[in-house]
Amino acid sequence: MSFTYQRLNKDDVALLMVDHQAGLLSLVRDSNPDEFKNNVLALADIARFFDIPTILTTSFEDGPNGPLVPELKEAFPDAPYIARPGQINAWDNQDFVDAVKATGKKQLLVAGVVTEVCVSFPVLSALEEGYEVFVVTDASGTFNLTTRDAAWNRMSQAGAQLMTWFAVGGELHRDWRNDIEGFGGLLAGHLPAYSNLMQSYAQQTAS
Amino acid sequence: MSFTYQRLNKDDVALLMVDHQAGLLSLVRDSNPDEFKNNVLALADIARFFDIPTILTTSFEDGPNGPLVPELKEAFPDAPYIARPGQINAWDNQDFVDAVKATGKKQLLVAGVVTEVCVSFPVLSALEEGYEVFVVTDASGTFNLTTRDAAWNRMSQAGAQLMTWFAVGGELHRDWRNDIEGFGGLLAGHLPAYSNLMQSYAQQTAS
Amino acid sequence: MSFTYQRLNKDDVALLMVDHQAGLLSLVRDSNPDEFKNNVLALADIARFFDIPTILTTSFEDGPNGPLVPELKEAFPDAPYIARPGQINAWDNQDFVDAVKATGKKQLLVAGVVTEVCVSFPVLSALEEGYEVFVVTDASGTFNLTTRDAAWNRMSQAGAQLMTWFAVGGELHRDWRNDIEGFGGLLAGHLPAYSNLMQSYAQQTAS
Amino acid sequence: MSFTYQRLNKDDVALLMVDHQAGLLSLVRDSNPDEFKNNVLALADIARFFDIPTILTTSFEDGPNGPLVPELKEAFPDAPYIARPGQINAWDNQDFVDAVKATGKKQLLVAGVVTEVCVSFPVLSALEEGYEVFVVTDASGTFNLTTRDAAWNRMSQAGAQLMTWFAVGGELHRDWRNDIEGFGGLLAGHLPAYSNLMQSYAQQTAS
Amino acid sequence: MSFTYQRLNKDDVALLMVDHQAGLLSLVRDSNPDEFKNNVLALADIARFFDIPTILTTSFEDGPNGPLVPELKEAFPDAPYIARPGQINAWDNQDFVDAVKATGKKQLLVAGVVTEVCVSFPVLSALEEGYEVFVVTDASGTFNLTTRDAAWNRMSQAGAQLMTWFAVGGELHRDWRNDIEGFGGLLAGHLPAYSNLMQSYAQQTAS
Amino acid sequence: MSFTYQRLNKDDVALLMVDHQAGLLSLVRDSNPDEFKNNVLALADIARFFDIPTILTTSFEDGPNGPLVPELKEAFPDAPYIARPGQINAWDNQDFVDAVKATGKKQLLVAGVVTEVCVSFPVLSALEEGYEVFVVTDASGTFNLTTRDAAWNRMSQAGAQLMTWFAVGGELHRDWRNDIEGFGGLLAGHLPAYSNLMQSYAQQTAS
Amino acid sequence: MSFTYQRLNKDDVALLMVDHQAGLLSLVRDSNPDEFKNNVLALADIARFFDIPTILTTSFEDGPNGPLVPELKEAFPDAPYIARPGQINAWDNQDFVDAVKATGKKQLLVAGVVTEVCVSFPVLSALEEGYEVFVVTDASGTFNLTTRDAAWNRMSQAGAQLMTWFAVGGELHRDWRNDIEGFGGLLAGHLPAYSNLMQSYAQQTAS
Amino acid sequence: MSFTYQRLNKDDVALLMVDHQAGLLSLVRDSNPDEFKNNVLALADIARFFDIPTILTTSFEDGPNGPLVPELKEAFPDAPYIARPGQINAWDNQDFVDAVKATGKKQLLVAGVVTEVCVSFPVLSALEEGYEVFVVTDASGTFNLTTRDAAWNRMSQAGAQLMTWFAVGGELHRDWRNDIEGFGGLLAGHLPAYSNLMQSYAQQTAS
């Protein structure tokens, strides 16, 4: 049974950020808030670093779900922004699908809140349409680990690949020499443990 | 390898509630009792909200397994109710299978106690007969996480899809506009964290 | 070193419910939301069952902290309700202290959100004034277990007694014969596992 | 600040087994059922091995709480057996207190279900009366770890000593030479890991 | 993709108990000793209850691995007993394979210590030879959860089905009416929580 | 036994930040790096918000322990900065003790890495000299939870009070009205869950 | 669906050790440092015991990632050592691929830091080229369990087999008689629990 | 209430190593074997580094408890070695007490297996005799966390101080300048994470 490595390629990929809204974030309890916030912003920084077309979408911003978190609005001021009038599966919204298709990419990174609904549903829809789909698991969140495990299983069995923001960054960058300073800065900003290594290194080699 | 999204459709689905009996519930220790009770009742409310044909079945109600929990009796007063005289796998009971077939549905939601027996066995039987089977994992319970993990693995490898009650509700509802009040109320009743969002919203927009 | 059992006595006790507000509840992550909601409401039912003078207080209801959860408003329609204009420690609010003193009780049950601030601060203040103070730990919540453990330690070392709603109910009731039906109903409503026992019992003794 | 070691002495100690009833055991979720059953029976075997006066008490055996587990009935056929008509704190039952006093012992081992009520209340009462009280923590059980931790804290702060069945056995036996075979057999019966050591030893020294 | 339910059938199945030796059991730390001992003995009782051909095998009994635990020797006095002279994978021992083939069964239940070696290796070998293989996960043990998870994954991906002793018992028994007393007794002996239900039931229906 | 509430008072308190160095931070594993970084910086922001005299100290910055993290250097450019030449207990360094005494405060907040050494030792020394000592537990870190629990116990038994940065902030601020904007901003910057509440509130009250 | 057991064969296998560098090891938090160090060195000892061709590679040794840990340098003084100038996926480095191909082996054991990047990427590349790939999971490490689980899933779904160092050792050794002393010594050096069994055995059979 | 810092002083302290025997170590499950072995050996190295009088004692070495682990025998070839003929509490053995007294020290470090018996009993006895007692918690082990927590509580309430080997080392060393090389080597040998820092430092400062 031959295997083809569906490898993230920065020229082939788009990012879908689904329902990272202030209210819905209150529901996320499969990671702690400091960690989750960092993961979401790290993914956003990766998308900007690699100029990846990004699509933002929200569900009922005017209701209890709350507004898109301001950091994402600021990170992607020119991104398509689809405020869905009611569709739970973003893929049921034609504007959203059009925006995805308009990117012309065949690889989709998907992250969102909550995992088993706002992430899983468009992931399964996109797989059905033939996209290579990569779930950014740690920039997605939900109620608890039971829910997360069930959602991961359903998506994985359907052919989605489970990744994390750090793996996405590494697979896209390919080679440190493409931009050592830039990529190092990106990691330092979101990995305190790596930042510490850099601090020690800077001091020790300076002396 | 093409993938077809087996998407829950409220017109194509039936719900099987297997052995949620007062005695057997004492055995459930892979979630806490408050959470598990809420999950089971949430699933029941979803079935009623979407008018999904529901079948209740029990095993040895007159013995130590105890009676069906009264909330489920009350939720589905007219549902087929198969008190199995001895079959451990509900699918071995012809009345149960007949009731399933009588619904005319091809998608089956299954929840029950305990997961690796009362859920797994009919799930595997139904898969063999060609049904699309969705396990409502968090409305199912068993002795411990080891047992749960093994049961999930066996069902998933056989082709069952692992879901949770919230994902089931979202996939069935499709669009908030189909009934904003109704669906919101359902969520508020079973997701305290979402209910809190609604309370804050109501106050802040009222002022 | 002689020990005196400071035993809860329904004639000597008042209950302080501090900042159970819809917004603040979003911060609680040392128990799951189903469990925590049940614990808070169980404590409220206990207070009503034993006619315990109860004082409600909130912090900045009109801001992000959100309104008092409606179930508590409904449970105690006639309770003193002190919406503090800014004091973080409820004991710094003279109306609150006056309300406590007006009860004439020497034993105080305290629960609230978040544990290390809204509970700890008035607990320490009340201990200093000579009250016997009992923290209802499981009807109090905070960010994580580290925070909870530190807060419990500080209060316990100061002389507060750590309890849970079930222990409070049992210590107040003293003897089942004081009201078997009533107390049994209270437990059944908040302990699904106990309710299951009652269901099995009812069926088995009826047959 | 001088310290006196309140050391368990087999001639000074009585054992109180409180409410180990079939129904109430369903509520215990701070240890798994296999482990908890073993701990309770190990404590019973210790009491019999050292001829420690033992008092059994139950609460509402005829109701949902269920009967005393049969193994304890069989282990102590001649022990005082106080079926309390309603008192939640066993120490409120005069027959129980009389039975304790009739033993003439100053040290009390207490185990029961649930920890924060059936154990804590008589522990605090006995401390007030001047007994040296030792809680057998692992032969006591309750709803969850939060409840357990609060109950342990309250008892410990009042002066009770937290022990486990193995520590009780060791402190009572004092010296293996008092009965090597007997004590070894007791351990082997309740510590599978120790039994394994004995099996390997027996084979290897036999060869 | 059609699915065939490989259902355990008591006439088609053999049990392989691999290296449950006193020394090796000291290495098991993915479950606690009380629980693991119970699981192994429950599986043995199931095999005897259904007259399932059982094969015992050990590795270096005379060395540090220690002797087969005596309970298994006693449970299966007439079972083929292959003390392997050195083969790590039991399937590399011709006597063992011959014993398996001599049973004439196509379904194999496998349990052993440690999971990733003594269980995994013969499981993979048996799958290659076309057997239907069922791992009794909770009667198998190893060093830690990381190791267990990796081993489960490898076996599952190869086609083995992950089960637990309780699921094995239920799938083999099929219908309580085949022997209500016998099967109930088997469960009561190994599920303290179920035994409690039976005790309460017996008392309540007797009164 | 009367109790005096040693309440943090912004005019009476100094902060000691001990050994938050880039290398030593690699050793911290009782919280995750995102959370720990946030906690340390939150404490720093509190100290600046309330103009609390702060003392920085490090151990062997030029060696593997690495430099003080740059965020702390920047936060307190004018703080006494004692680079200890070798003393493990900062209190053994006369410059450090002099700096503490020079603040003229009687209350000390202490945080550092690692908890059982760099925090515990000066905490015990300061207690001996009569200071009121408050450990900021979540801005302190160490190897694992076993180590943390032992260290907390030792300090607590000696009279230190265990707090967290959020409790410190609340106890110092006393009343929101002292600076609503400022304190709210401080919380929003370090509590993503609270920031989300503020976002939703801002939107909902704006509309 | 026929299954072929891809069984590790010491003549067919090569080992790839990827980025076990002093700095990167600081990032590993899905196992504790004592355990992880032992696992890595155990794998190295296995490779040496079976004379398995081993390839070492590092990423930016001169920067914050730090040098290869000295124990690995010493263990494999003559192994190909590819210090990659920038490629994140070792398989993108032609020298590395050449070194792998030069071994002439078809089975690859891969371990490294961090799992989802330094291990996953070459694993997927090697699978695509038709190698049989075995991940040594416990000699690989990463930030947390979420990341680990996602990485394991991606590799497993692609066809990699998840193993642990102990399973690798057992599958390679095949039969204790090939070298009882040597293999026993290897285990004793890395499994303290097994070493204890050997100590007891040695004493008991000596007496 | 004044507090005196009982500070470990290398001239005032003796170490008691109680029952670290090969068989008994099989019972330890509150830490993993790699970690526990490292902790015990680290404590031994500390004792040798500071020339602390050390006393070894064992219980029934010739039986299933097994021999003292060889590393400890080798570490302390000249230490008093009391093989107790039967006393469970080492303090009941006059030779042991004599050996302790012969050291002339007032501070005792105690570690052993299992915590609630072999450590707790002599700790309580020594406290009664007026010694300052420090439990080295992480070089002591027992069956599970419940047992450990109860034992820690009992000892702490009696006045023992809970420490860990790293805290012991730091408190004894006082100042790095007393022997930078020696103490650094000791840490590097037992703290892989610290060793990594040293490796990186060495390389970076060498370049």
Image (cartoon, coloured by chain):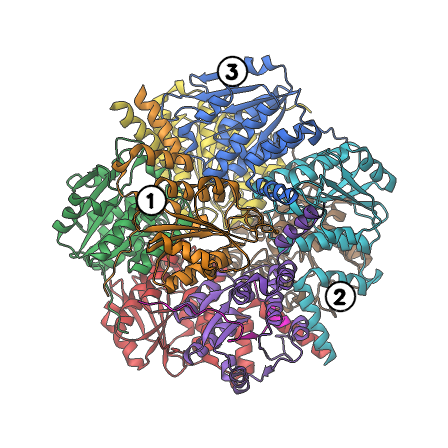
Chain colours: A purple, B red, C brown, D yellow, E green, F cyan, G orange, H blue
Quarter of the picture holding the C terminus of chain D = top left
Residue D47: x, y in percent?
41, 30
Residue A6 is inside the magenta segment: yes
Q: Nearer the viewer, residue G89 or C179?
A: G89
Tell me the kind of residue under disc 2: Phe
Q: Quick check: B51 left or right of B176?
A: left
- In the rendered image, the vertical position of residue H73 relative to residue F77, given as above or below: above
Q: Residues within 10 Å of mark 3 (few under 14, many from 20)?
A: few
Chain to which the residue tagged by mark 3 belongs? H
| Callout 1 secondary element | loop
- In the rendered image, the vertical position of residue H130 relative to residue F8, given as above or below: above
Q: Can you see residue H175?
A: no
Q: Residue at x 51, y 13 (%)?
A: H94
Residue C111: x, y in percent?
66, 55
- Real-space Cα distance between discs 1 and 3? 40 Å
| Callout 2 secondary element | loop
Q: Which residue is mark 3?
A: H78
- Real-space Cα distance between discs 3 and 2? 70 Å
Q: Residues within 10 Å of mark 2 (few under 14, many from 20)?
A: some
The reply to whether the C-beta atoms of the residues labelled 2 and 1 are less than 8 Å apart is: no
Find the magenta span and give its range: A1-29
Q: Which mark is drawn over residue E114? A: 1
Tell me the kind of residue under disc 3: Asp
Q: Which residue is mark 2?
A: C60
Tell me the kind of residue under disc 1: Val
Q: Can you see residue G79?
A: yes
Name the mark nearer the viewer: 3 or 2.
3
| Callout 3 secondary element | loop
